[in-house]
Amino acid sequence: MDNTYKIILSGGGTGGHIYPAVAVAEALQRLLGDRAELLFVGAEGKMEMEKVPALGYRIVGLPVAGLQRRLTASNLLLPFKVAKSIGRARRVIREFGADIVVGFGGYASAPVLWSAQRMGIPTLIQEQNSYAGVTNKILAARADRICTAYEGMERFFPAPKILLTGNPLRGRFSAEGIDRTEAAAHFGLDPAKPILLVVGGSLGTRTLNNMMKAWVDRLTAEGRVQVIWQTGKFYEREMTEYMASRSSAGIWRGAFIDRMDLAYAAADAVISRSGAGTVSELCLVGKPVIFVPSPNVAEDHQTKNARALSDKGAAMLIADDRAADEVIPAAMDLLGDEARRTGMARNIRSLGIGDSADRVAAEIIKLIERK
């Protein structure tokens, strides 16, 4: 074998699949330097085809598509797209000369992993959630290694193949090193008063925005708590118009938070969805959190992610349909109970794995060298 490690990374459709793959790519470059030759494989027309090249990586698209839950013409075409994708995947693997194929979930990764397994090429799967995705469950039997973010994944995967690595994250998140006073000042807030972070992802979350609309007048009138409120790009115009005639005293509001490390450092408690990446970030920064899982995700995996933490006293869980009435009162109680916040922070921090991307990258290198 020459000195080059030729690695295909595949997954996509959402940032939850794309950014862990990019984090591992960055770790591979740190560990291997110029010896790392990387190729991403995604689904044509999906966000990875734009996001990955913007970060400086080469990507090839396959015509694969997901199964729609209702009867549509696209479902009838699905077998033809899958067959075409498998043929193209085999050609990509062969022409690239892949030493290994690494899958991060989503239907985009299925054809290339399936093909690699039948071509005798090592494969590694990284599962972000506490409830395994369909693609990863199907492909697990022939995978050489399965890297997970949660314990207890033996109910989905062969136990001897599992390695607990945590979720690969881009950037550095830590409970240490950032001064809370400086972090609060970044958002124009008073560090002497409690700060609540409300975050619903880059596009935003209607449930959390409606919750804030129902409570913002009371919060600003009472002035006991300040809020960093990320509204999301999709809802920015609506939220701007809604707040135009209202007081925003003690409220920082924006479509996007470009310094999440500062937002976490400033916050005394967090209200959030429970996607895999967000859960992993919160474990590393060690913040008490109230999770409001999205009900609009495959196999309700956000509820399962949140429950994996709430069962260990590391988070609170409130269902989406109860958020408007219950979340802000629960957050106010939490902010007033320092002992409980301290306990939750300690418990959630104990679940964090800070070097996850390096752990997955090291396992990839080990599989190649074993071959």
Image: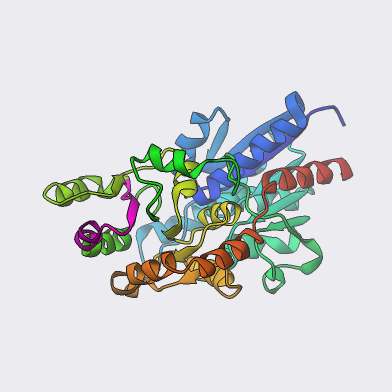
Above or below residue 136? Residue 256 is above
Q: Is residue 293 visible?
A: no
Q: Return the residue found at the far left.
A: 245
Residue 189, x across and y down, in percent: 34, 44
Residue 121, x across and y down, in percent: 77, 46
Seen from the viewer's position, the closer of residues 109 and 308 is: 308
Residue drawn at 41 percent across, 62 percent down: 68
Q: Is residue 219 magenta?
A: yes
Q: Is residue 5 left or right of residue 285?
A: right
Above or below residue 202? Residue 37 is above
Seen from the viewer's position, the closer of residues 201 and 36 is: 201
Residue 332, x across and y down, in percent: 36, 67
Give the total of numbered labels: 0
Q: Which residues are magenta?
A: 216-232
Residue drawn at 56 percent across, 34 percent down: 59
Q: What is the quadrant of the C terminus in the image?
A: top right
Q: Is residue 204 left or right of residue 310?
A: left
Q: What is the quadrant of the N terminus in the image?
A: top right
Residue 32, x across and y down, in percent: 77, 31
Q: Is residue 227 magenta?
A: yes
Q: Return the residue found at the far front.
A: 192
Residue drawn at 59 percent across, 60 percent down: 135
